[in-house]
Image: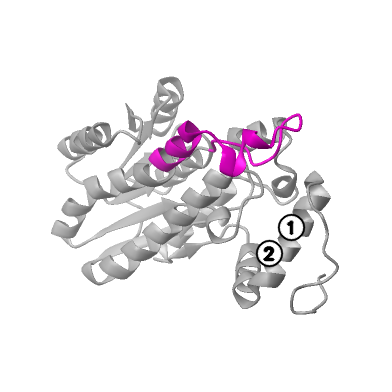
């Protein structure tokens, strides 16, 4: 899908990757860029900057998302591109002051539910709302922002990892199901990106595995828009993710052992085993 002349809706568009996407789409000649975000000041400021409009919405609220999409369709007549980008990290997987119950599998039910509500169902709500009109026209594009954590694993938040795996599965199913009906689907899977989300993780001491290779949101947006215009499914702003993903598929046992060692080096939480179960050397 060429961006010029298109109407785009970006959820989580007030900051980070979403804001960079909105700017890139506007610069690429989009007819309208609509910002959806839970934070009114940032959404309003960015909408003013890119000459678009904004809606304050919690994507975890199905009725609010449906009302927003109806309003966008009423104003602009169509939505050509949905960037389902809103996301949160809830619940650390690293102990705080020795308290292992703080995060990981022991994160609170509220943290798990919020992760599910935003990272997966927020995308489902938006896609369900925009898809009928796209199918009626026989064209449209869905960009699902997942994460490299959805292909691999994040060493910090378990809830983030699980819901991003679900997001990748959502995108894959949509691509398989609707490609023959004129709907393009792309799945965006970056690693570390220099945003407020990464800064917050750094402040908690949880981002050592992401900071070395972190890139800026503008680079992610540029790669994402190129992927959309090329109708590419898997968009990897960090090229090394492809190699990691292949390594994981080729030898899951070795990959898990290596990731366990990597986590131990960074966070000091590993009891080493001298060799793999199959007797092979672990590097």
Residue identifier under label 2: 256
Q: Is residue 162 above or below residue 250?
A: above
Q: Quadrant of the N terminus?
A: bottom left
Q: CA distance from mark 2 to mark 1?
A: 6 Å
Give, as a single range, the part of the protein colored magenta: 89-117
Q: Is residue 48 above or below residue 138?
A: above
Name the disc covering residue 278, or none: none
Residue 10 at least partly seen: yes
Asked whether, in this view, residue 217 is left or right of residue 233, the answer is right
Q: Quadrant of the C terminus?
A: bottom right
Residue identifier under label 1: 260
Q: Residue 133 at x, y = what percent?
A: 17, 52
Q: How many marks?
A: 2
Q: Residues within 10 Å of mark 1 (few under 14, many from 20)?
A: some
Task: Name the quadrant containing residue 247.
Answer: bottom right
Q: Residue at x 74, y 79 (%)?
A: 278
Q: Are marks 2 and 1 in contact (CB under 8 Å)?
A: yes
Q: Regarding mark 2 in the picture, which secondary structure is present there?
A: helix
């Amino acid at each position: 899908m060429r961006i010029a002349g298109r109407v785009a809706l970006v959820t989580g568009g007030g900051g980070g990757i979403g804001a960079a996407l909105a700017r890139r789409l506007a610069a690429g000649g989009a007819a309208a860029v609509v910002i959806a975000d839970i934070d009114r000041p940032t959404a309003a400021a960015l909408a003013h900057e890119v000459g678009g409009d904004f809606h304050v919405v919690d994507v975890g609220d199905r009725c609010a998302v449906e009302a927003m999409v109806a309003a966008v369709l009423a104003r602009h007549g169509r939505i050509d591109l949905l960037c389902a980008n809103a996301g949160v990290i809830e619940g650390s997987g690293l102990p705080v002051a020795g308290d292992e119950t703080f995060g990981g599998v022991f994160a609170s039910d509220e943290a798990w539910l919020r992760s599910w509500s935003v990272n997966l169902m927020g995308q489902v709500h938006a896609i369900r709302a925009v898809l009928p009109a796209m199918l009626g026209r026989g064209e449209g594009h869905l960009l699902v922002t997942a994460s490299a954590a959805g292909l691999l694993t994040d060493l910090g938040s378990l809830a983030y990892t699980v819901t991003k795996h679900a997001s990748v599965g959502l995108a894959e199913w949509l691509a398989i199901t609707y490609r023959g009906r004129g709907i393009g689907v792309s799945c965006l899977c970056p690693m570390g990106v220099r945003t407020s989300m990464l800064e917050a993780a750094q402040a908690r001491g949880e981002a050592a595995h992401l900071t070395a290779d972190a890139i800026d949101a503008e680079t992610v947006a540029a790669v994402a828009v190129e992927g959309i215009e090329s109708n590419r499914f898997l968009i990897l702003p960090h090229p090394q993710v492809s190699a990691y993903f292949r390594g994981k598929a080729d030898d899951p046992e070795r990959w898990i052992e290596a990731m366990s060692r990597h986590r131990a080096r960074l966070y000091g939480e590993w009891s080493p085993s001298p060799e793999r179960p199959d007797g092979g050397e672990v590097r």
